[in-house]
Image (cartoon, rainbow, N blue to C red):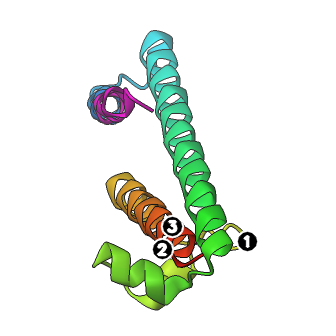
Amino acid sequence: MRHRWVIQLCGGLMVAVTVVIFFSLDIDSIVGWSLYMICMIATLLVGQRLQRDNKRELTIMWTLADEIGYTAADLKRLSGKYGEVDWALTRPEHMDFFPGIKVIKTVTRKMQIEQGERALETSHQQ
């Protein structure tokens, strides 16, 4: 995940190359069509990788949220973006909506901080 920007850059370049190849194809050129198909497959694989990484991060986020009893409303509060319905659609049983990876990581980090603060308060009260 440290080099996610490289994956995204490669994905974008593959889409651009695919479009250029498609519009410059000679209908009878096997080489052109082969190159086009290779680019299409590569673009598909990059997209699948990014989606898999997003799903993993959302699962981590919701596992933590469930541990501390947070709802979609709490995630909305922590993120400052998207609505409650959007956040509810990110649950692992749905995953119909994917916020940006930076937002997911920021929300997860904020929940970890709040969880630590709660643990500290609990230990001071005892």
Work out which residue is located at the far front of the displayed protein and give it.
Answer: 126
Residue placed under numbered mark 2 in the picture: 121
- Picture layout, residue 93 above or below residue 82: above
Dot 1 falls on a residue whose secondary structure is loop
Counting every numbered tag in the picture gives 3
Where disc 3 sits, the SS reads helix
Viewer-nearest of discs 3 and 2:
2
Whether the residues at callouts 3 and 1 have beta carbons within 8 Å, the answer is no
Residue at coordinates 46% horizontally, 66% vertically from top-left?
111
Does the magenta portion include 3?
A: yes
**Neighbour tally class for label 3: few under 14, some 14-19, many 20 plus, Cα within 10 Å:** some
Residue beneath the point at 48% across and 74% down:
121
Residues drawn in magenta: 1-14
**Front residue of this view, candidates 11 and 73:** 73
Whole-angstrom CA distance, mark 3 to mark 2, is 10 Å
Q: Which residue is mark 1?
A: 93
Residue 101 - label? none
| Residue 98 belongs to magenta span | no
Residue 6 picture location, percent across and down:
32, 26
Relative placement, left or right, of 56 versus 20 is right
Kindly indicate the quadrant of the structure image that contains residue 67.
bottom right
- The residue lying at 42 percent from left, 26 percent from top is 27
In the image, 35 versus 111, the foreground residue is 111
Quadrant showing the N terminus: top left
